Image (cartoon, grey):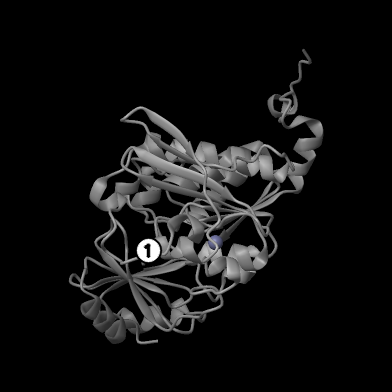
Amino acid sequence: MAVTSSRYGRQEIFYGIGPEGQKKLKKGRVAIVEMSAIGTAVANNLARAGVGFLRLIDGDYIDVSELQRQSLFTEEDAHEERVKAVALQEYLQKVNSEVTVEAEVTMLDGGNVDSLFEDVDVIVDASDSFETRLLINEACHALKKPWVYGGALAASGMVKAFMPGGEEPCFRCFIGDEEYVPGEQPTCATEGVLCSTTSTIAALQCAEVLKILTGSDMVNKNLISFDLWDNSFEYFEVEKDPECPVCRGEYKYYGKVSGSHTVSMCGKDSMQIIPSVEGEVDFEKYARVLEHQGKVKYTKYTLDFDDGDVQIKLFKTGRAIIKHVSDEKRARAVYAEYIGL
Ligand SMILES: [Zn+2]
């Protein structure tokens, strides 16, 4: 057996990759949607594997409740409420300076998905939002890009690579015509989740990404479904639905720019306000206005305001997280009063 001490030697002696596969990984470009427990593990895995370009898409900051499962973040990151995409970018560039890691401090939506996906080879879904996943599915169908789905709940998980092409089923084919009702599905906030679950999903997704980037014909056609507590690991065939609107090119989320809207943050006692038009907020100017009303501090990416009652984290684009608020009306009122962009 060949003995090698090169950086990627263990991958290069693996029959499925080899030196040629490693060159393909170096040219590979991957976008990861959300730096969740799954997303951080995927990013870590792919950066170390030598995938040449990673785009980390996430508009959130690090909270101490996420350290249980979101690998690579530290207590200091949580204490400073650092922006996830940037904290992870900085860490991964230290891990592997040969790859390019780009941080996109934004929430994926119908308006920015084209620019975030069009120059990558594969997209990894690490989102815990069903709507985001439906948008990824539609965008990847329109742009003819492969994407790898990963869903976690408690000790169970599901993974499937959705490939572009006429005969391939899409995510909408898989879920059927069940209409999604926000708030009615169990989530990780209500059912909990194990780090073992999210790590397993990330590992399975990464294997599929490596196969796709190296052009392997071993991409798993089946949906992988497992439960680490019930000791089950199964494969299911996903059939193409002849009635699927997405497969016919009828999209509900892709290409639609939503107006100003409010989103509750899964697992965080906060509401997020996304303005209809995102701009570039001048933090210095805003800090001068707000400092008469409470404590203000800002970095390159976020501005924090706290008057003892209201706590706001404002992002550069005008998006804001209103903390300790679970009521949409109250969140919008706070935004209008203090930000009012
Ligand atoms: Zn379909």
x, y percent for residue 186: 28, 53
Residue 336 higher or lower than 70, as above or below: below
Residue at 37% over, 79% down = 261
Disc 1 packing (10 Å; few <14; some 14–19; many ≥20):
few
Residue 148 higher or lower than 257, as above or below: above
The quadrant of the rendering that contains the N terminus is top right
Q: Nearer the viewer, residue 78 or 9?
A: 9
Left or right placement of residue 214 versus residue 321 in this view: right
x, y percent for residue 285: 44, 83
Left or right placement of residue 162 versus residue 6 in this view: left
Where does label 1 land, which residue?
178
Residue at 67% over, 40% down = 211
Q: Nearer the viewer, residue 217 or 169?
A: 169
Q: Outermost residue, left direction?
A: 309
Left or right placement of residue 340 versus residue 170 in this view: left
Q: Amino acid at mark 1?
A: Glu
x, y percent for residue 60: 41, 61
x, y percent for residue 205: 54, 42
Q: Nearer the viewer, residue 301 or 41?
A: 41
Residue at 60% over, 72% down = 249
The secondary structure type at the circle numbered 1 is loop
